[in-house]
Image (tube, rainbow, N blue to C red):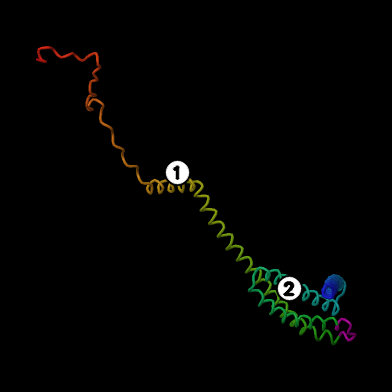
Amino acid sequence: MEAALIIFALMLLAIVGLGAYLTVKAVGAAKRGVERTVAQARRSVEDTTLRAKSFGQVGVAGALAQLRLDLRTSMRATQQALAEGAREDASLRESLSLFERLSAHGHELDGELKRLEQEPDRQRTAELLPDLRERAGKIIQAADSLRWAARDRARRFAEDEMSLLSDQIEMESGALRDWSREPVDDLAAAAAEWDAAQSTPSPEPTPTPRPAALNPPAPTVQYPWQQKAPRPESAG
């Protein structure tokens, strides 16, 4: 009885623990989903604001907004291209590692540009613009190079696969148009029948009986009334 109670208590604890673990996992997944949604919404709002500033403002403020917009657009497109390609091509994982290092420089520059948007000394900010453009150009060029290299690699693989598929289809089409050739199944059946005929021994010939005319005649049966009584003179 005590053993049954202990087993029941252990099972109850295991069920409670499993339920708590699943609850924590579900809450964590929901929290991460909400965080991703909020981050995406924040990025969309910020991109829209930067686009409006780049078109609606002139001078230093418009230049800073355009730099941030170009940098963020290039980095986001590269990240998406590499992430999608790495799911099918494991060799792109090294490119992802390089992009993470590049992304650190991009985030640093984006933060600096964002702070300069609030800088009241526009003259000092204007003096920094050439250096900022050069840094942004190097990061954007590196990101674009990774992105286009990944796309060229994916396109080359697709072209090679399509070329191989076309060759296989041409071979199959040629085989289907060869009307003089028997189907493969018929050829296989004929070969199996031939092998079976060769492996089966032929029956031995049975002796033929001689004609009935060569057999000896049957003896003549004599009946009692056909026998003659002996003559008297022969008895004497």
> Which range of residues does the magenta coloring cover?
115-122
Q: Residue 121 appears at what percent x and percent y?
A: 88, 86
Look at the picture and state if 108 lies above or below 154.
below
Left or right? Give the position of 44 relative to 173. Answer: right
User: What mark, if any, has residue 79 been given in the picture?
Assistant: 2
**How many other residues sit within 10 Å of disc 1, few (<14), some (14-19) or many (≥20)?**
few
Q: Residue 172 appears at what percent x and percent y?
A: 52, 52
Say what amino acid the circle numbered 1 marks: Ser
Q: Which residue is mark 1?
A: 180
Instruction: Identify the image quadrant of residue 54.
Output: bottom right
| Mark-to-mark CA distance, 2 and 1 | 57 Å
Specify whether residue 54 is in view.
Answer: no
Give the residue at x 9% y 12%.
233
Between 8 and 195, the one lying in front of the other is: 8
Could you tell me how many numbered marks the image carries? 2
Answer with mark 2 or mark 1, whichever residue precedes in sequence: 2
Say what amino acid the circle numbered 2 marks: Gln
Q: Residue 235 appears at what percent x and percent y?
A: 11, 15
Which of the two marks, 2 or 1, is nearer to us in this view? 1
